[in-house]
Each structure stands twice: as C-alpha cells, then as structure tokens.
Amino acid sequence: MNKSIHYILLICVCLMMHNGCATYRAHQVVPTPIVQAKEEIPEEALLDVGIVVFESGELLEEEAKDQGTNPEIRKAESHFIPYHLKNTLQQSSHWGAVRVVPAGTDEVDLVVKGEIIESNGEHLVLKIEVIDATGKTWMEKIYEEKATPALYNDNVTGQKDAYQALYNTIANDMAALKRQLNAYDIRQIRTISKLKFASDFAPEVFGDYLGKDAKGRTTINRIPADNDPFMKRLLRIRERDHMYVDTLNEYYEVFYNEMWPAYENWRKNNLTEQTALREMKRSSYARMAGGALMVALAIALGGEVNNTALLNAMVFAGGAVIINGINISKQAEIHAMAIQELSESFGNEMKPVVMEFQGKKYELTGSAEEQYARWRELLRKIYYAETGFGPDASPGDGEREPLNEN
C-alpha cells in the first residue's frame, strides 16, 4: 500500500472525527426545584437586586449559523433571559425588589450580570456574576443545561421555562450566599448602595462619606443623620429613579410575554432541526469517509488485482457514496436555512417612555440604554433645581426644560 493511500485513510479518520461539540467548564444543571424562603423576611433583611440586560458579545452571521441561532434572536434573548431570571428570583421570596436594568450600575444592593455563551433551543450556557454594593463578588459561574423535547411540555409563561432547572439553580446559589450574611453585613450593603446614589448626584455633599479598603471594596466613612435634608431629597429622587425602572420593566414584561409563544416554538423546532442537522452531518461524514476508503482500496489493489471490472465497480461505488454524502450535506444546509427563517419575527426596538412630574410630561426616546441615560440626566436637573447644587443651577431655578416635552 503506497503513501497516497495512507493519506486518504487519514482523511477518512478526520472526517469521522469531525463532528465534535464545544465543551465548557460549566456547572452541569440537573433537575432542581427552587428553594423558597420558609418564612417572610423582614424588610430590613432584604436586598434589592438589579439584573443588567445580558451581554452576548458580537455574534457574526457565520458564528451564529454554527451555533444554530442568529444575531437578532440573541438580541431578543438578552432581554428575555434576564426577565425570566427576575421572575424566578421573585418566586424564591428571598429578595426585595428585583428589577431588570438596561445598563450596569453599582447603586443597587446586589447586581447580577450575565453573558449568553450559547443558546439554541438545545443548549443554554450562561455566565453569571453577582456583585454587591461593596464591590464584593459573590460568585462568578457558568451554568449549562441541555434540553430534551420533554422539557418543552407544560411550560407556563413567566413561571416555568424549558431551562427552569438552570434558573432555579442560579436562584438557589444566590440565596445560599445571602444566608451566609449576618444583619450587620446586610445593613452595610444597603447603606452603601444609598450612599453611592447620593455621592453620584451630590458629590460636593456626600463625596467623602465612602472610602475604599485594602481590597478595593467600598467602605463607609460616615453616615448622614436621620434628618439630613439633602439625604431626604436624594432618597425621594432615588424613589423616582426606581419608579422609572419599574416603568421600564413593564415594557420588558410586555416584550417578554409577546415573545414567549414565538420563542417557545422556535426553540422546540430548533431542537428538532439541530438534532436532525447533527444526525445528517454524522451520516454524511460517515458515508464520505466510507466512499473515500473504497476508492483508496481500489487504487491500492490496482497493481495486484487483474479484474478491471471489479476495480471499476469499487471506484464507481465509492464515488457514488461520496456524492450521496454531499447530497445529505446539502439537505443539512436547507435545515440550517429553515432555522434562520424561524427568527425573522424577533426585534427589540424600545418604544418611547413618557414620565410625568409636577404636571409636565417627559418623553424619553432611543434605546433602553439611551433612555436611561437621559432619565438620569433629567433627575439631576430636578435635583439641581430643588437644592441649588450643580454647575448650571441656582436656588431660584424653579422651571425645568423637559426632555422632549409632550
């Protein structure tokens, strides 16, 4: 057998081994019920949670195709997944207010950041990071769950998802970490988040109330008096900020509810498509490898076998098998195209949000991130007008120009 045959055999082996899959250093999720609080938790022992709209990194068309999704679905998922996690955390009853926020912030008791590593109806892989107001990282883990057709049965919008075990595991891990805190720890976190908000809006008043320790975590230098008038104003401003984020979450809820049936169908169909695609690829590679092997054997035996008809038949049969494998690959491409077509109905354009204060309406437009930035700008103007602090305000500034007033 000559060297060329060895090369062909090596190609055959490579074809057979080609159909591998990505692996992650992830926590493999098993069926997991949610652990709920056994009794009502006093308000002073609760922590508010802000779940930042998830990241997914730039997903190119070719990468998306390999993963069995597309960039538009991934954008939609970056809002859908954190909102379902919010619902799950609320069901656990371990937390105070749980809100999805459009941009990163450290002015909330506990921040949850997420990254979608893989999501295609068959696999969900999420990277989750949880950080408290002091800057301490509670956890940074990767969670992975593989779906089966049975997991798409009996799901309920807002309550039970095909990957509910994954969401429950995240919620249980967070609750277990919270249970390690004592009353002093919780009080420190709550106070620091308030002072961070205050120092952001009024650094000239509260800038020196916080400091840093040797680990770079935020510490409290001093605490304002209970009747501090500036702090009272800022807490009212903070309530307005929460009111806006609650309004934003109402939009997220509508988007989530409208997306649920189409997304559920897409994931179920995509699971079927991905399974069929993988089986076709496996069959294709096996057939092409077998065909190449038959051609190789015919060439190898050419100098030793005198039956020309037999050799020609082997070459012809091997070529036919290769062609058959290529045809199956083309069918697989058709399945991949069908997967892409399933996602065309998704979008995540942010509708304008209208807020009203003291008889004036303010319309915020643009993306959620842009709206939130404009909202914070508006809050600063309100605070400057009420207190006289700020570069462009004076104690007599009673009128405010609204952002896009209606």
Image (spheres, rainbow, N blue to C red):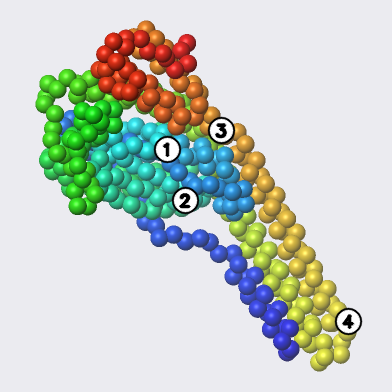
Whether residues under marks 3 and 4 lie with C-beta atoms below 8 angstroms apart, the answer is no
Q: Residue furthest top?
A: 359
Other-residue count near label 3 (Cα within 10 Å), few / some / many at <14 / 14–19 / ≥20: some
* Residue under numbered circle 2: 117
* Residue under numbered circle 3: 347
Q: CA distance from mark 2 to mark 3?
A: 20 Å
Whether residues under marks 3 and 1 lie with C-beta atoms below 8 angstroms apart, the answer is no
Please tell me whether mark 4 sits on a helix, a strand or a loop.
Answer: helix
Question: Which of marks 4 and 3 precedes in the sequence?
Answer: 4
Residue type (three-letter) at the residue carrying disc 1: Val
Q: Nearer the viewer, mark 3 or mark 4?
A: 3
Is residue 29 placed above or below 324 in the rendered structure? above
Other-residue count near label 4 (Cα within 10 Å), few / some / many at <14 / 14–19 / ≥20: few
Q: CA distance from mark 4 to mark 1?
A: 67 Å
Query: In this orientation, which residue lies closer to the viewer: 158 or 105?
Result: 105
Q: Is residue 120 left or right of residue 245?
A: right
What residue appears at the point 28 percent right and 25 percent down from the top-left corner?
238
Q: CA distance from mark 3 to mark 1?
A: 15 Å
Q: Nearer the viewer, mark 2 or mark 4?
A: 2
Q: Position of residue 57 (x, y in %)?
A: 49, 47
Q: Quadrant of residue 7?
A: bottom right
* Residue under numbered circle 4: 309
Q: Nearer the viewer, mark 3 or mark 1?
A: 1
Question: Which of marks 4 and 2 precedes in the sequence?
Answer: 2
What residue appears at the point 77 percent right and 77 percent down from the top-left corner?
295
Q: Position of residue 240 (x, y in %)?
A: 31, 21
Residue type (three-letter) at the residue carrying disc 4: Ala
Query: In this orientation, which residue lies closer to the viewer: 18 or 111?
Result: 111
Label number found at residue 53:
1
Please tell me whether mark 3 sits on a helix, a strand or a loop.
Answer: loop
Is residue 155 placed above or below 213 in the rendered structure? above
